[in-house]
Image: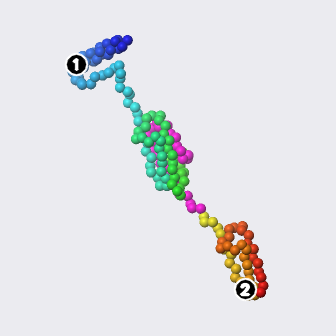
Amino acid sequence: MRTFKTQLSFLILIQLFFVACDTGITTNKIIDLVNPPPPDIKTYTLKIASAMGGATNVEPTKSEYIFDEFIQITALPIDGYVFVKWSGTQDKKEPVLLIKIQANEWIIPIFTKVDAPPAPLTYAVKVDTAIGGTVSISPEKNEYNPNDFVKLSATPN
């Protein structure tokens, strides 16, 4: 069988040589019909815009992706920010985005600043003693939290 393939390849090459000579085509390329080159593979790009408040992680990280290849993009907010959603060619709200690439993708992560939590509410107790007695506080502290119990005792002179 191998001899037949070799003979067939040789005959095809000879025919192509004569066709090229008859048509006046000159070429240094030899066309291999038994082992043709692989077809052109369509590739796509992924562009991720930088965004204030966070970064992204892409797996796998490449300059081009082939059709139907899976890509995972993770939103990584910095301290004081939270992830809101993806924008661009993707419109999702999950921080981990799994896409099957079938076209060029352009993606923007949207982060928003988180308000700082309010300072804890505390109270100070100040007692002014009048003439003729004293006031004691129990427990004696500089600040009290809401719902703390404070005992005030008045003692006359």
Residue 13 seen anywhere in this rendered image of the structure: yes
Q: Is residue 30 above or below residue 130?
A: above
Residue on which the image places disc 1: 21
Q: Nearer the viewer, mark 2 or mark 1?
A: 2
Left or right relative to 72: residue 129:
right
Residue matched to label 2: 130
Q: Are marks 2 and 1 in contact (CB under 8 Å)?
A: no
Give me the residue at 74% from left, 80% from top.
Answer: 135
Q: Which residues are magenta?
A: 93-117
Q: Residues within 10 Å of mark 2 (few under 14, many from 20)?
A: few
| Amino acid type at mark 2 | Ala
Q: Note whether 69 is above or below 2 in the view shown.
A: below
Q: Is residue 110 magenta?
A: yes
Q: Where residue 23 sits: x, y (%)?
A: 23, 20
Q: Nearer the viewer, residue 111 or 131?
A: 131
Could you say where residue 19 lies in the image, as x and y percent from the top left? 25, 17
Circle 1 crowding by C-alpha within 10 Å: few under 14, some 14–19, many from 20: few
Vertical placement of 67 versus 73: above or below? above
